[in-house]
Amino acid sequence: MSLKSPLVTVMTRAAMKAARHLKRDFGEVENLQVSRKGPADFVSTADLKAERILREELERARPDYGFLMEETGASEGKNGEQRRWIVDPLDGTSNFLHGLPHFAISLALEERGEVLAAVILDPIKDELYTAEKGQGAFLNNRRIRVSGRRRVDEALFATGIPFKGKPGHQVFLKELEQIMAVSAGVRRWGTASLDLAYVAAGRFEGFWERGLESWDIAAGILLVREAGGQVSEIDGRAMRLDSSSILASNLHLQRDLTKLLLAADSG
């Protein structure tokens, strides 16, 4: 059982408040006003409303902290404060707009490139993932750990597929071919924060993707590490919040996954 710190409590309350509005909008998804943000990438009024709620709640609790938010960008902390919130108000916007019940709110607290606390909330399934540095990872207040599977042929992996307007289609197909040939399966669910949370919970053995942003991965990185897993770039380099790729897995399969993906990239 997790005893939430005041910090995680603040994050959880903000996420829960935003989630209530997302669930209401999800029930009326066909009536949402949708504007075009980029090729095959949309932003809805739901994103903006959720982000506004999150900012108001977090700013009220910690007025000096800065922000990095998907929709409205970055703002510095006040009074020299180095901590900032990294916020994705609706990870899985395309799922949301198509009526697919798989999306999340992702919150992380970062200080000088290091994630100190994380909350990922799946509003539809009522699953709340939390982590704080050095304190473990939790799902609905129950401790979670990465999978203990050691063999690739018994492992289930998750990934993200580059869509229209994104580079790297051919590289991805080679990577997918490599993993498909030796694993128990690959899933593409379209919400990176939940993919990482599922690795932390032992539902997936690993996850890889390219071209993600800090708000997609910040919370998930801490969750996986606090659940006993590993996170790096695809080529094995140390993971940063501005890295161009991510590979997360349990301790047993990180090396095998790295070799498989590097073989695809060099082929």
Image (cartoon, grey):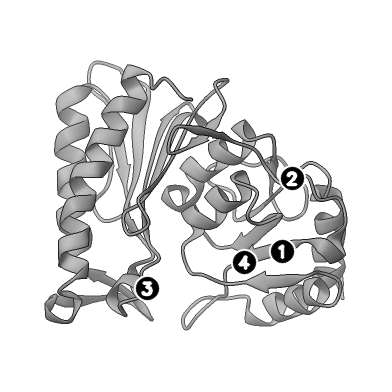
- In the picture of the structure, the residue carrying the numbered disc 3 is 95
Depth check, front residue: 26 or 80: 26
Residue 263 seen by the camera: yes
Q: Residue 172, which numbered label?
A: none
Question: Which numbered tag is attached to residue 159?
Answer: 4
**Other-residue count near label 4 (Cα within 10 Å), few / some / many at <14 / 14–19 / ≥20:** many
Residue 181 lies, with reference to residue 201, above or below; the image says below
Sooner in the amino-acid sequence: mark 3 or mark 4: 3
Q: Amino acid at mark 4?
A: Thr
**Residue marked by disc 1:** 156
Give whichever of 163, 253 is nearer the camera. Answer: 253
Answer above or below: position of 243 versus 110: below
Q: Position of residue 1 (x, y in %)?
A: 48, 25
Amino acid type of the residue that numbered disc 2 sits on in the rendered structure: Asn
Which of the two discs, 2 and 3, labels the residue nearer the N terminus?
3
Which residue corresponds to the image point at 58% horizontal and 20% vertical from the top-left?
A: 134
- Residue 160 in the image: state x and y as whole percent: 57, 69
Q: CA distance from mark 3 to mark 4?
A: 15 Å
- Cα distance, mark 2 to mark 3? 27 Å
Residue mark closest to the camera, 4 vs 1? 1
Q: Is residue 63 visible?
A: no
Looking at the rendered structure, the secondary structure element under dot 3 is helix
Name the element at disc 4.
strand
